[in-house]
Amino acid sequence: MKFTKMHGCGNDYIYIDCFKETVINESELAVKLSDRHFGIGGDGMILIKKGTKADFEMVMYNADGSRGAMCGNGIRCVAKYIFDNGYTDKTSFSIESMGAVKYIDVTVENGKVILAKVDMGAPILKAADIPVKSDSEKVISEKITVAGREFTMTCVSMGNPHAVMFIEEHPSDFDLDFYGAKFECNTDIFPNRINAEFAKVIDRKNIEMRVFERGTGETLACGTGTCATVVAAILNGYVDNDVTVHLIGGDLQIQWSGKEEDSVFMTGPAATVFTGEIDL
């Protein structure tokens, strides 16, 4: 089976072109290929298919084989793959994931995509729809104690659930593996588990962040988590409407008007690492 390894800000996935390849037992294959010692290695696997509701479809799996609803870094890489491999000559097109359609504009240099801007849709703030268990309709700046430490949490869904915590220490000094795992698996509060972001506001246009992704653990970047973090920061009055988020793997630019019905826009890079073939 042929594959392409790609990443967006270090958030790396194994991409399989289902126009040419047939994948059986998708979830099992995702676990096998994502293993960084015995497989190809990645944060998960993404299948590229022809869309039914959109021009194209991405089917995303986390490294543990669980299905992911949306991946902001992944969808930019899918857009790059589609254009670079000649499946479209348009610089604006649509990609669906689990029925949700996203619209993408790509920036091209020397015939290859270097950046993609994605309309990530409007954030979901209603607690029941994220889902997160709370006595409030929306979880904005709500106190939560996890493993003996009190955090202030704002919850947002960008097609998948996120809990955003703003912390005082620099994210590089934060014990993400410990607290991230405690958040992710706290099903008493997060029935479907949760992606946990720990962020520090630098100024009104800059945020630094680390993320613990549901089903994967820490990743170098998370597109939906970055969007959720900026939405949370705007809701709390910490930042303006156009913010650069600095992640371990690179920077993402996020724009949101602050109006609940308006889309969040994410702009960032996409890169091909290598292509190969693996015996299954």
Image: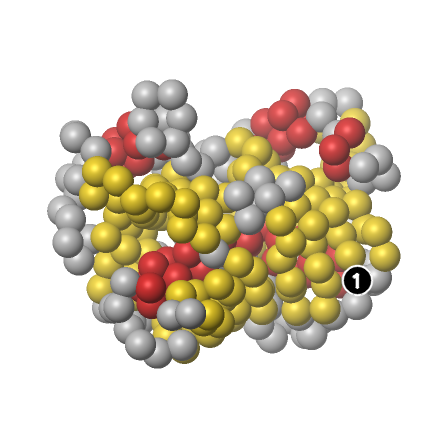
**Residue 110: % across, % down:** 42, 70
Tell me: residue 53, above or below residue 183.
below
Q: As drawn, is 143 to the left or to the right of 7?
A: right
Task: Give the quarter of the image for residue 268.
Answer: bottom right
Q: Position of residue 155 (x, y in %)?
A: 65, 50
The residue tagged 1 is 205
Q: Quadrant of the N terminus?
A: top left
Closer to the camera in the image, 212 or 74: 74
Q: Residue at x 38, y 31 (%)?
A: 41
Residue at 59%, 50% in the rendered image: 225
| Picture quadrant of residue 33 | top left
Task: Relative to 280, say whether 235 is above or below.
Answer: below
- Does 226 sit left or right of 51 as displayed? right
Residue displayed at 46% across by 34% down: 215
Res. 187 in view: no
What x and y, as percent, mark residue 129?
A: 53, 55
**SS at badge 1:** loop
**Looking at numbered disc 1 in the image, what kind of residue is underneath it?**
Lys
The answer to whether residue 197 is left or right of residue 121 is: right
Tell me if residue 271 can be seen: yes
Count neighbours of disc 1 (C-alpha within 10 A) and say few if under 14, some if 14 to 19, many if 20 or more.
some
Instruction: In the rendered view, tell whether residue 20 sits above or below residue 92.
Output: above
Q: Looking at this rendering, what residue extends furthest in the front direction?
A: 110
| The C terminus, quarter of image | top left
